[in-house]
Image (cartoon, helix red, strand yellow):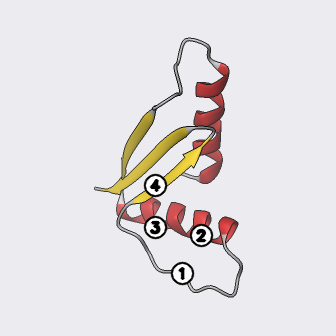
Amino acid sequence: MKLEKVLEIANECVENEVIPVEGLTLTYALDKQSHRHLDEELFYKTNNNNSSFSHNEVIEVNIAGITFIFNQK
């Protein structure tokens, strides 16, 4: 899963009045390669390039009040 897809999901949830986003947590189990790629993508989009990347077992990010949790299969 790429960051673009995560943002698309968040946008769909926010725009859909039927989905209450307050307290909404979405959990995904990703394959090892997709998990690492998403972790790197998030790291480099949110940190300066002077930091060194260290892969996380669990990725948790809050977008538009929705908590996304990404675990590795």
Q: In x, y percent, where is residue 68?
A: 47, 45
From the image, state whether disc 1 or disc 4 is nearer to you. Answer: 4
From the image, state whether disc 2 or disc 4 is nearer to you. Answer: 4
Q: Which residue bears the numbered disc 4? A: 60
Disc on the earlier residue, 1 or 2? 2
Amino acid type assigned to the residue bearing label 4 in the image: Glu
Spatial separation of the CA atoms under disc 2 and disc 4: 12 Å
Disc on the earlier residue, 4 or 3? 3
Q: Which residue bears the numbered disc 1? A: 53
Q: Quadrant of residue 48?
A: bottom right
Q: Element under label 1?
A: loop
Q: In x, y percent, where is residue 34?
A: 45, 59
Spatial separation of the CA atoms under disc 2 and disc 3: 10 Å
Q: In the rendered view, would you say 32 is above or below 14?
A: below
Instruction: Please say if the residues under marks 1 and 2 sit with CB atoms less than 8 Å apart.
Output: yes
Q: Quadrant of residue 18?
A: top right
Q: Quadrant of residue 52?
A: bottom right
From the image, state whether disc 2 or disc 3 is nearer to you. Answer: 2
> How many C-alpha atoms fall within 10 Å of the one at disc 3: few (<14), some, or many (≥20)?
some
Q: Which residue bears the numbered disc 2? A: 43
Q: Residue at x 46, y 32 (%)?
A: 23
> How many C-alpha atoms fall within 10 Å of the one at disc 2: few (<14), some, or many (≥20)?
some
> How many C-alpha atoms fall within 10 Å of the one at disc 1: few (<14), some, or many (≥20)?
few
Q: Which residue bears the numbered disc 3? A: 36
Amino acid type assigned to the residue bearing label 1 in the image: Phe
Amino acid type assigned to the residue bearing label 3 in the image: Arg
> How many C-alpha atoms fall within 10 Å of the one at disc 4: few (<14), some, or many (≥20)?
some
Spatial separation of the CA atoms under disc 1 and disc 3: 11 Å
Q: Element under label 4?
A: strand
Disc on the earlier residue, 1 or 3? 3
